[in-house]
Image: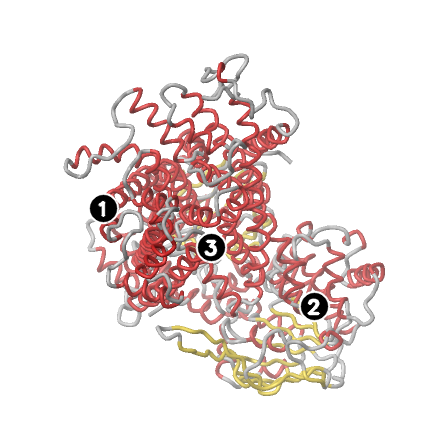
Amino acid sequence: MRLSPALVIGAALSLTAVGLAALSFFWTPYDVTRLTVAARLQPPSAQHWFGTDHFGRDIFSMVMVGARASIAVALVAVGVGAGLGVPLGLAAAARRGGWLDELVMRLNDLIFAFPSLLLAIMITATLGPGAFNAVIAIGIFNIPVFARVTRGAALSLWTRDFVLAARVAGKGAARISVEHVLPNVANLLIVQATIQFSLGILAEAGLSYVGLGVQPPMPSWGRMLNEAQTMIYVAPWFAIFPGLAIVLTVLGLNLLGDGLRDLSDPKVRRAR
Amino acid sequence: MIAFLVRRAATLALTLLAATAVIFVMLEVAPGDPAVTMLGLNASDEAVAALRAELGLNAPPLERYLAWLAGMLRGDFGVSYTYRTPIAELIADRLAVSGPLTLYALALSTLIAIPAGVHAAAHRGRAADAATLGLVQIGVATPNFWVAMLLVLAFSTGLRWFSAGGFPGWGDPLEAMRALTLPAVSLALPQAAILTRVMRSALIETMSEDYIRTARAKGLSERQALRRHALRNAMIPVLTIIGMQFSFLLAGAVIIENVFFLPGLGRLVFQGVVQRDLIVVKSVLTLLVLAVTLVTLAVDAAYAAVDPRLRARRR
Amino acid sequence: MSLLRIDRLSLRIGAAQVLRDVSLHIAPGEVLGVVGESGSGKSMTALSVMRLAPRGVAEGRVLFEGEDLLAASEARMCALRGAAIGMVFQEPMTALNPLHPIGRQVEEVIRLHRPDLDARAEARRALERAGLPADRVPHDRYPHDLSGGQRQRVVIAMATALRPRLVIADEPTTALDVTTQARILDLLRRLTAEDGAGLMLITHDLAVVAEMADRIAIMKDGEVVETDETVRLFRNMRHPYTRALFQASVHQPARRARPPGDEVLRAREVTREHVSRRGLLRRRTAFRAVDRVSLAIRQGENVGLVGESGCGKSTLARALLALEPLQGGAVTLCGAPFAPGAPPERRRHVQAVFQDPYDSFDPRWTVARLVAEPLHMLRPRPSRAEARRRAAAALARVGLGDEALDRYPHEFSGGQRQRIAIARALVCEPRLVVLDEAVSALDVSVRARILDLLAELSDRLDLSMLFISHDLHVVRAVTDRVAVMQAGRIVEEGPTERIFSAPRHPCTRALLEATPDLERALAARAARAPHEKEPAR
């Protein structure tokens, strides 16, 4: 099977981001907690690939460590969303028009009535800033997304003859949901997970940019950008590299999602 | 059609009511006593108790919730703990910045995305399409506050066309628009990327429908079929996204207003959060939820106007 | 001179050779029937004439009134399409723009080609001619207000509004009921005759062309295997494929007469309602899809259930399978009540085969697992090895070998899949199999073989079958008794031969008359033949 360029580039970018984050646990070019005032605000050079910040810390090392927070928060938020949303969606579709279906749809409406980032800010502000609360704030929006995608796909599967055949074979709704529906929506859910993952990284960056995400001294991409903003005239590299890290990671995940969707969509596959 | 809209409105009103309850409960469990916040940590216990009584904070929660709802229905949002001014006035001031900013950004996003999406779909698989798709991928991946920083770097420090922040007020409308331009562009670009992609794929999907083949069999050229038959059908998913973007732009404005030091609703709510001025937060959030709900209703009305099947189903 | 002359047309799309040296011709006023099974290239031939086929490499010539369409500019094609050549498509439900009123969609073709005419008046006239007068079907209606037959009339009005010299109809009635089909075919024939236009009628149904066409071209695998004047073609049938197609179309599986045994299934006064909530107050409104239907099926008996789409036959089938709760009446299976939630030991006695062979299988399961799925109803549960053995045995019964077990459904053709579906229905040795339009989606030659298989199985296993179909030929071929359904009720029931030879209810009679019948059509033609003028060359 031929892999699409989107899939290859997306996988490469995503793996690089995850790989650098993992590597940062063992090794970074410089210690990100050591302040070297003598080396402050240096432009990119052979010693400091991405330059240094106002405390003389190596920005490349900070970007590496910052990837941890972004990836961890977004990943756990996807886990929360899928873990709760998928079963809800499956159950709602299995009893279409029932009270659970109605409840899921109304909760869906309710959560979508809030501007998402604003509610996330509210939640972190209420519960206090920090990585764990950022996960909750972002994860809560993933629940209805996964519930809705699962429900929509499951509803159309429930009209298929093979589900009818399983019912004729005496299988109950729960068993059909697990044996027939879930495996057939899995592709769609994987694609949705990569999308929510990339949105989670953007949201985490936004939250830490306003100071509600991961707390110092852990570096995070969003807060680096916040700190860089006041120095944008003197040290533009401080603003550019963490931003590029966000863009490339999100781009990678989006391309990966597109590539996976094309791979699993028989319509596209046949057209190749 | 009227019945359809009334029914939608009723559902949305219920959603709105549920949303106010969620907001109330959330802020109820939030740590921090507003009376302490207002008087400072050194205030005497008696002073705090007196203020709590004055603010009506001692009543049972349900009673306070209902009082709050009733107040909002009268247009009385209460008094800010920190500013000591009626919240309605505060909000009106800030809305004069945030409202125009959101609409400006929405207009920009739509004006960029629809032609770009249509053009890409019409030239599917060719260079223009590939270039558009590449830009879309980058646009979708870029956080708007980073766009804002790059724009500031390029246009206010490099080229000095726009100011890097602040808002001169609406005394000079031209100057005001100039101050809103960079924020609006930074809000609009990532959204335009999303909308372009939706427009393109909706149009491509519509172009493969049977009725497009019928239109071609009538003697319409591909371009005519696209313009006369595909475009309006493709607008249905696009409308949904435009509606959702409104909510997104309102929220995105919180961060962008911080980047550009704009005195908008976003900054108001953010300062309210930081300063524990929860009654401001409560009011602004409710107002934004109301705005989102109204836009949803408007999108439903637009649906019904575009699609006769929807009008008929609820007749 | 021919109106249309296709000269050695070949078409390659990607790696696939879709058409190979296709040559056809149509004279003015002539009806050419193009017949073939799916994948024969008949639709691609039509789309190639319109130059609307998917991009590919075309060779040969398509001469329309002497002009080579393959060499014509796109602008020239736009001028011809709709004005000189009209086209009618298979699927009327999706062929119209859902957002435009029907009148406007017909007006468009007139405005486009003849700005000098009063488009509104012309469109009105065209719709009236197609049987949609404005006083009965207002022309500001939207497609979703119309039935399938009415929508197809709108498409025909569009195709014929400017009195084109050639009309191409691609399976125009496949998606419609037989009575609607008869009226639409009649309309097409009348309009093209009035205008003196040529008609290229594409269909998979030999009986339809036998009734309609002056000349017939038989296509297979992208080639025309035989073409001749209708009566002569059927008289000679020079090509073996033509003969095979003919035999499959009139095929009657051999069946042994068996004395019916005990009652297997009985439905008493069964009522099914579809409840929907609508309106401002979400009032419950109930639509009665099945209305107090009683039916009994005995051991070894094959019962047919016929009726047009929407008459409630599939809803009744689901009720008999105890998949949905009843609003009245009861179903008993082998003497015990049968309702949703019935114990597996009872449920295993009735199994089903559905219409769409491409939709009936979970694409992620192997055939072994799919066929064995009903086995979990057996007590004690068979072991994994035993389940596989039984699946293999069931597959052997339908003529498939062990090598099928570990493959996935997409590796099989439509006919093979339907065999797998039958194997799945047989695996737990039920007493009754419900076949809901089980052969409707199959090509005629495949269908004949599946019918043989079903007849053989019901004889050998002493199996009862409930055969649900809109196709009267199929039901006649394999059943002992037939029930005719209309608007949720059984209006006539009796032995198959009696129903077909002496129908009593007007609904039955209408169905029989509308059903195209190859032998009847040929007999009528033969009687007419001496007076019929030889079609122009």
Residue C267, position as x, y percentages in the image: 63, 84
- Amino acid type, mark 1: Asp
Picture residue at 60% right of the left edge, 61% below the top? C356
Residue found farthest to the top: A46
**Amino acid at dot 2:** Ala
Q: Tell me the quarter of the picture where residue B274 sits.
A: top left
User: How far separated are the C-alphas under marks 2 and 1?
Assistant: 66 Å
On residue B174, the disc is none
Q: According to the image, label 1 marks what residue? A: B93
- Check the residue under mark 3 and report the chain it is in: C
Q: Nearer the viewer, residue C537 or B104?
A: B104
Foreground: C171 or B13? B13
Does residue B247 show up? yes
Question: Residue at image x 53%, y 16%?
Answer: A48
A121 vs A23: above or below: below
Cβ atoms at labels 1 and 3 below 8 Å apart: no
Q: Is residue C19 visible?
A: no
Asked if A127 appears above or below B137 in the picture, the reply is below
> Badge 3: how crowded within 10 Å, few (<14), some, or many (20+)?
many
* Residue at which label 3 appears: C170
Q: Vertically, is C420 above or below A122?
A: below
Label 2 belongs to which residue?
A169
